[in-house]
Image: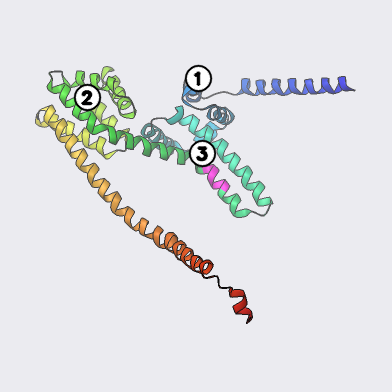
Amino acid sequence: MGLLLAAAVGLAVYGAFHGVRMYRADAKLPGDLAVALEVGSTRTTAVGSGIDRMGMRFAPTVLSMMGAKRVDALRRRLDMAGNPGGMTVDRYAARRAVYGMLGAAAAFSLILRGQAVIGLIALVYGLVWTDVVLRAAIRRRRNDIERTLPDFLDVLAVVVSAGLGFRQALERVAEKYKGPWADELRITLRQMDMGVSRREAFEQLRKRNSSEQVSMFVTALQQGEELGAPIVDTLIQIATDMRRTDAQNARRSASKAVPKTTLVVTMVMLPATMILIVMSFYYGSGVDFADILSGG
């Protein structure tokens, strides 16, 4: 009996393994996803790679449901986010399919238990989670670029004033920097190496980023080139304007934080303080209110 049970378990394990292998062998990976799974696996976690493989069959369906315009907008958002975790268009579609199905399954289970509101929240969570991650990556990358850009321009101005041409100085400084802004500059330099004009390469740099400071940098650079202004003076002026804009944004953020802080103090801290004071008087007085209420 024990041998038969062991044989049955062995056959079941072999069948499951063989079935999974056949499933993966029959699956046709889209080109973008195949490259992402092969090259981008080092940029994502093991869980993320597993989710991508689970949803690769459904990626074309999700993209066809999105339509051409939304897919083009998605490509721009991925460029703005810097393809976080090796995310490509097909990886996005695969993850959205998996999270959507998990959210739908959780919602169905919760609704059967009578928890319709929580089930609806789970469904919405599964449908929008990938977009939430993408928006957070865009915001984080924009903040990193805006924090790096003024100092980068100061260093670039010093290198240009030392006698190097703008192109050579841009390459030299970009090699010393790390992060999203250095990545963007390397893409721009590679485009110019492939024959793209400097103006067009910087226009594409503007389109890949939602940062106002990047747009300011490209606009000032192009205007300085058209007017024949010295590049060093242009770079220094751009960095000064960016720091002034950062200071204005910081003051604006601080002014917005005051009403929020007041609301928190009024709604949370003040009632809690009043309760603490009343309870301190109660326990400190030693009065038994139960006896008073009972007439004792």
**Which residue range is magenta in the image?**
122-127
The quadrant in which residue 207 appears is: top left
Q: Earlier in the sequence, mark 3 or mark 2?
A: 3
Numbered marks: total: 3
Query: Where is 241 relative to 39, above or below?
Result: below
Q: Tell me the element at label 2.
A: helix
Residue 114 pos. (x, y %):
67, 54
Question: Badge 1 is on which residue?
Answer: 38
Question: Badge 2 is on which residue?
Answer: 198
Q: Nearer the viewer, residue 13 or 259?
A: 259
Residue 66 magenta-highlighted: no
Residue 49 pos. (x, y %):
54, 27
Under mark 1, the amino acid is Glu
Query: Where is 165 relative to 251, above or below?
Result: above
Q: CA distance from mark 1 to mark 2?
A: 33 Å
The quadrant in which residue 216 appears is: top left
Under mark 2, the amino acid is Arg
The quadrant in which residue 142 appears is: top left
Q: Nearer the viewer, mark 3 or mark 2?
A: 2
Q: Earlier in the sequence, mark 1 or mark 2?
A: 1
**Direction right: furthest residue:** 1
Q: Residues within 10 Å of mark 3 (few under 14, many from 20)?
A: few
- The main secondary structure of the magenta stretch is helix
